[in-house]
Image (cartoon, grey):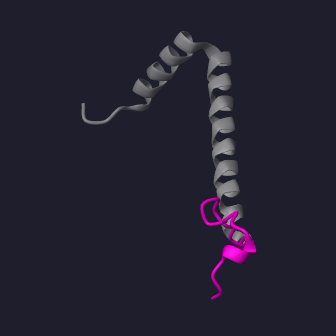
Amino acid sequence: MGSMSIWHWIVVLAVVLLLFGRGKISDLMGDVAKGIKSFKKGMADDDEPAKAPPAAPEAPRPLPHQTSSAPEAEKKPV
């Protein structure tokens, strides 16, 4: 009673084949394989940006409130 014999496994396999049929099981395995392939591709795509050299930083742009429209004569010399 502790373990399943070969006859138990054959009966289980026969029931599964009767319920799902041969075509559905192969379709299911194909879908699982596609899922694994897309997962591996996604993991490889995540690694590519980490290997790329960092881009040069952009020069800082002045914010609108930091620029003044005052004439040059009104500005104080530094």
- Frontmost residue, 72 versus 59: 72
8 displayed left or right of 14: left
Q: Where residue 18 appears, x then y in whole percent?
A: 55, 11
User: Relative to residue 18, is residue 56 depicted above or below?
Assistant: below
Q: Where residue 36 appears, x then y in whole percent?
A: 63, 42
16 displayed left or right of 36: left
Give the extent of the magenta segment.
57-78
Which residue is at 44% across, 31% downward?
6
The answer to whether residue 56 is visible is no
User: Relative to residue 35, is residue 47 depicted above or below?
Assistant: below
- Residue 3: quarter of image: top left
Quadrant holding the N terminus:
top left
- Residue 26: quarter of image: top right
Q: Where residue 63 appears, x then y in whole percent?
A: 63, 62
Answer whether residue 74 is magenta in the image.
yes
Which residue is at 69% across, 30% downward?
30
The answer to whether residue 37 is visible is yes
For the view shown, which residue lies furthest in the front direction? 73
For the view shown, which residue lies furthest in the bottom direction? 78
For the view shown, which residue lies furthest in the left direction? 1
Which residue is at 67% across, 23% downward?
27
